[in-house]
Amino acid sequence: MRIIAGKYKGRTIKTIKGTATRPTLDKVREAVFNILGQYFDGGVALDLFAGSGALGIEAVSRGIDKCIFVDVNIEAIKVIKENLKSLGIESSEVIKGDALKALDGVLKNYQFDLVFLDPPYHKNLIDTILCKLIDNNLLKKEAVVVVESSKEENFIERYKSITFQKSYLYGITKIAIYKNVGDDYE
């Protein structure tokens, strides 16, 4: 797998062998960044269910200052650390742990500008995580949350200040974009 654009464009990153994770396809990753805009002017990102870390690393390559990677799989953690080391990325953190527990604990000191949410398909975690991001005050105003799911999955359109913006289909994959508008709707 290669980094598509930015500082690390063309550099290869490792992926996890086996079927324990489902890496975001290059065409989907490229589409995500076309939707978000090509480059970022700083900020902090969160890559939940990070797998190889490809989404977060791509964001850092395109100008995000720091990314926090969270995954429960020990092989994923090893691969993320190897990828960060091979690219010389020192500003990011890797957390081994359950995403829901991390949102309630170790991540509570952060506020994110960008969140990548790519849980295992058909586990019904997305609504819970979107709510935790808001309830735990983990999103800056105007923060964007990118949700990757199967095309069959449906989730909330609005919860307090986070609102659904648009979704896109790529084969069996759905990408949904949410934004923290900053106004608390109940």
Image (cartoon, grey):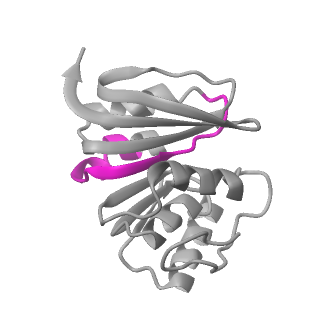
Seen from the viewer's position, the closer of residues 161 and 137 is: 161
Residue 179 is left or right of residue 174, and the answer is left
Q: Which residues are magenta?
A: 102-123
Left or right of residue 146, residue 148 in this image:
right
Image quadrant occupied by the N terminus = bottom right
Against 106, is 89 above or below? below
Residue 80's spot in the image, x, y percent? 56, 69
Q: Is residue 175 visible?
A: yes
Question: Which residue is at 35% across, 36% downward?
Answer: 179
Residue 182 in the figure: left or right of residue 22: left
On the image, the x and y values in percent for residue 162 come to 33, 30
Membership of 112 in magenta stretch: yes
Tell me what residue is drawn at x 52 percent, y 22 percent: 155
> In the rendered image of this protein, does residue 148 appear above or below residue 55?
above
User: Can the viewer see residue 25 in this picture?
Assistant: no
Direction right: furthest residue: 18
Residue 142: give x, y in percent of width and height.
Answer: 27, 42
Residue pictured at 71% horizontal, 50% vertical: 22
Q: Position of residue 124 (x, y in %)?
A: 57, 26
Nearest the eye: 177 or 46: 177
